Image (tube, helix red, strand yellow):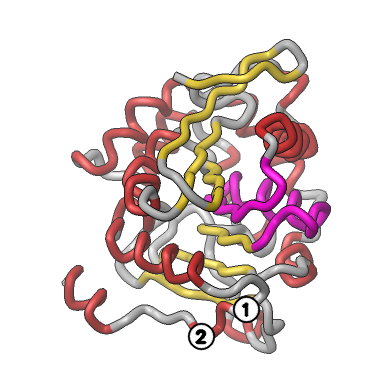
Amino acid sequence: MSAILLEDDIVHYEVLGRGRPLLLLHSWVGSWRYWIPTMQSTSVGYRAYALDLWGFGDTAKNKEQYSLDSQVLLLEKFLDQMGIMRIALIGHGLGAVVALRYALQHSNIVDRVMVVGYPMDANLISDRLYHISTQEMLEWVLVREPQTEPVWVDAPKTDSQAVATCLDNLKELELQGTWRNVEMPCLLVHGQNDPVTRLPDGENLTNMPDHAHLITFELSGHFPMLDNSNKFSRLLLDFLSLDSGASPQQLQLKEQWKRRVR
């Protein structure tokens, strides 16, 4: 287990691979652990870091650190302490919000950002998420299978207050403007059957800026990196291989990927 001290509190992370750095941030339930297949798939050419946010996994449970601003500051201090000056961010759910808010403030550090299950509007987040326990959330969004076991293992470590605080903070944010206003390439990935965050109607997704692109996983729920891990990893690698600053709008789900998951 790897850890650093920030504000005298433990921040847990894991790292795998060698090459250009990328950092993975987890969702409302679970921890760094469900990123293991993704970390393995990128380890040949990239150095993948996966971080537990405040209140999750093996990172400290300090209620004073649970705001979204504090989670963004955690990311800032982590990258600074690790000496990382240029990074690709991959965020999921809560991690997607943290990643985009950090990217908006640090365009000189973030080369590109991929957000999975990002709530483009607070009204598109299921009301159920605000009223259930961590265990109930887990049973709602994820079938217990071998590939999803890492989420089930670490979910009980989550402080429900961390989830509630971040959800309350979301109501104060202009979520759609965030991904439209970042300066670097932004790839939005969404599971079509995601029960946590719905996609807005088609009208709200038209006229995307050149730096942004949306790809939907038709057979996935809230965890496309587990539901379709090979397909997800290959898309991520294609995104990472683009030249710095190149638009992600050329990316697509290739036919051979679709045949593999039918």
Amino acid type, mark 2: Gln
Q: Where is residue 188, by image quadrant?
A: bottom right
Q: Where is residue 9, by image quadrant?
A: top right
According to the image, label 1 marks what residue? 246
Q: Nearer the viewer, residue 218 or 1?
A: 1
Residue 39 visible from this viewpoint? yes
> CA gap, disc 2 to disc 1?
9 Å
Q: Is residue 105 magenta?
A: yes
Task: Find the residue positioned furthest to the top.
Answer: 8
Q: Nearer the viewer, residue 210 or 43?
A: 43
Q: Is residue 119 above or below residue 84?
A: below
Q: Is residue 80 above or below residue 153?
A: below
- Which residue shows up at 66% across the image and 50% down it? 99
- Which residue shows up at 34% across the image and 72% down it? 218
Amino acid type, mark 1: Ala
Under circle 1, the secondary element is loop
Q: Is residue 212 magenta?
A: no
- Which residue shows up at 58% across the image and 74% down it? 243
Q: Which residues are magenta?
A: 84-111
For the residues labelled 2 and 1, say whether their Cβ atoms are less than 8 Å apart.
Answer: yes
Position of the C terminus by quadrant: bottom left
- Which residue shows up at 33% across the image and 52% down it? 41
Q: Is residue 85 above or below residue 75?
A: below
Residue 165 visible from this viewpoint? no
Any mark on residue 250, and which? 2
Residue 1 vs residue 175: left or right?
Answer: left
Residue 38 vs residue 242: left or right?
Answer: left
Q: Residues within 10 Å of mark 2 (few under 14, many from 20)?
A: few
